Image (cartoon, rainbow, N blue to C red):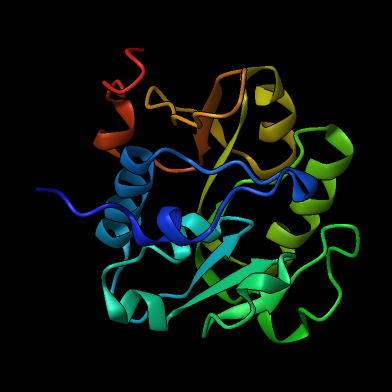
């Protein structure tokens, strides 16, 4: 029998923070993907993606990762960095040009919010960083202009949202070209 994801079992979604978690299968997919593209010693930033950070299986990956998060209920996580997207560069001086891989899932999908996240991404990323983010398909052009990411075939399942999100990234990987059988497209 498959173990239930501990993060999902312990941490309820909080609509006041606009927190809606990926499905268990999508979390597992993202964890496996991030751990597979990780190379020895790389630094990984998880921006507003606690379900993925808290579900990491590889301890080396977790030790080289930081969770940028507003929800103070998660501040006991070793890699926790308080992050308020309304102050996109505040307290981030030590992370300038620091991260090799960045995963982002903002609580809101507006151009204003994405613009603030883009400031953070462009500040903390190394020049050749891999960026993977999640948003609606209508944001494709804007996301390309902000952080040079393009839509992928694999789409996440987020059970308590009424609209479908897409994944976007700035690198190629075969797994992202597949269909998510959980949602069927």
Above or below, 20 against 129 in this view is: above
**Residue 23 coordinates in the image, percent (x, y):** 41, 38
The answer to which image quadrant residue 31 occupies is bottom left
Q: Residue furthest top?
A: 185
Instruction: Tell me which residue sits at (53%, 34%) in the image.
Output: 168
**Residue 116 coordinates in the image, percent (x, y):** 84, 51
From the viewer's perspective, tell me whether residue 66 is left or right of residue 118: left
From the viewer's perspective, tell me whether residue 132 is left or right of residue 105: left
Instruction: Tell me which residue sits at (34%, 74%) in the image.
Output: 61
- Could you tell me if residue 49 is visible in this image? yes
Labels in figure, total: 0
Residue 31 or residue 42, whichever sits in front = 31
Residue 16 or residue 49, whichever sits in front = 16
Above or below, 137 against 108 in this view is: above
The quarter of the image holding the C terminus is top left
From the viewer's perspective, tell me whether residue 112 is left or right of residue 183: right
Above or below, 28 against 91 in this view is: above
The answer to which image quadrant residue 73 occupies is bottom right
- Could you tell me if residue 129 is visible in this image? no
Instruction: Tell me which residue sits at (27%, 68%) in the image.
Output: 57
**Residue 132 coordinates in the image, percent (x, y):** 51, 46
Instruction: Tell me which residue sits at (53%, 80%) in the image.
Output: 77
From the viewer's perspective, tell me whether residue 132 is left or right of residue 41: right
**Residue 94 coordinates in the image, percent (x, y):** 70, 87
């Amino acid at each position: 029998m498959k173990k239930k994801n501990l993060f999902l079992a312990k941490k309820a979604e909080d609509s006041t923070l606009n927190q809606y978690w990926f499905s268990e299968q999508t979390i597992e997919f993202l964890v496996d993907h991030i751990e597979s593209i990780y190379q020895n010693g790389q630094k990984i930033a998880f921006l507003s993606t606690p379900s993925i950070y808290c579900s990491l299986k590889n301890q080396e990956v977790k030790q080289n990762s930081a969770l940028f998060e507003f929800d103070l209920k998660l501040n006991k996580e070793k890699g926790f960095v308080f992050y308020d997207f309304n102050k996109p560069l505040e307290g981030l001086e030590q992370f300038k040009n620091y991260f090799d891989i960045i995963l982002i899932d903002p609580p809101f999908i507006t151009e204003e919010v994405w613009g603030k996240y883009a400031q953070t991404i462009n500040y903390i990323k190394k020049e050749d960083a891999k960026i993977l983010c999640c948003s609606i398909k209508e944001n494709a052009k804007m996301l390309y202009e902000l952080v040079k990411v393009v839509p992928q075939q694999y789409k996440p399942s987020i059970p308590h949202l009424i609209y479908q999100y897409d994944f976007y990234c700035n690198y190629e990987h075969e797994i992202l070209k597949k269909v998510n059988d959980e949602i069927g497209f």
